[in-house]
Amino acid sequence: MVTKLIRRAIRKFRRLNPFIIIGAIAVLTALGVFAYSHYSRSASVIIPAKPVTTVTSSTSENPQSTSAAQGSPATSSTTTKTDKSASGVPAKAPSGAGPATPSGTFVSNHFPGKNDTPSSEESLCTTTPGATCYIQFMKGSDVKKLDSKTVDSSGSVVWDWDVKDAGMSQGKWKITAVATLNGKTASADDSLSLEVTP
């Protein structure tokens, strides 16, 4: 009697076995699709930026030049952009206040590479001194961003970077500047997209 029951149970199990296997495969496939779609979204990728430095040079011309003949030596001076303010004074964040809404030229060229324009970009974020600011580029679930920088007493930070180094795919990228201060955040979208061409 017990043997008959065991045999009957084994037969039922053999009949159900393909359904159990198919069900297990379906469940595992559904879990795999969910995990892939959830974890395959690109995390924010930091765009490599070139260092921005200040270079000031001053040269006096030969005393026999025409300027010297007029009684004053000629002097030429060249200055490039910097991450620091002209005074070089670090910013002190106001306590408790949030940042001003970011403004500025978030990208210098919205159509890099188009009509033989360069792929190099300059991005500027202006907000409250002492806040941190970054600029984010989004296309679907793909997110790239310029690394956060602290705004000094000039109220601005600058990034020099190249679209070719950013790993951006072809298409339109939404541009957003995000500033954070004292745990509060303010953001602003560029009215134009960054259009990356092949």
Image (cartoon, helix red, strand yellow):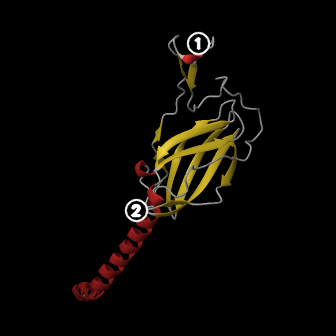
Q: Mark 2 highlights which residue?
A: 198
Residue identified by numbered label 1: 69
State which quarter of the image contains the N terminus: bottom left
Looking at the picture, how far across and down is residue 79, in whole percent?
57, 28
Q: How many marks?
A: 2
Residue 149 shows which numbered tag?
Answer: none
Residue at the spot 68% in from the left edge and 41% down from the top edge:
126
Please report the residue visible at 63 percent of the width from the left and 49 percent of the height from the top.
Answer: 177
Q: Position of residue 106 (x, y in %)?
A: 61, 49
Which of marks 2 and 1 precedes in the sequence? 1
Give percent across and percent down for residue 184: 71, 44
Find residue 175 and report its image quarter.
bottom right
User: Which residue corresponds to the image point at 57% horizontal and 50% vertical from the top-left?
Assistant: 107
The percent position of residue 20, horizontal first and vertical second, equals 32, 81
Mark closer to the observer (1, 2): 1
Q: Residues within 10 Å of mark 2 (few under 14, many from 20)?
A: few
Query: What element does badge 2 sit on?
Result: loop
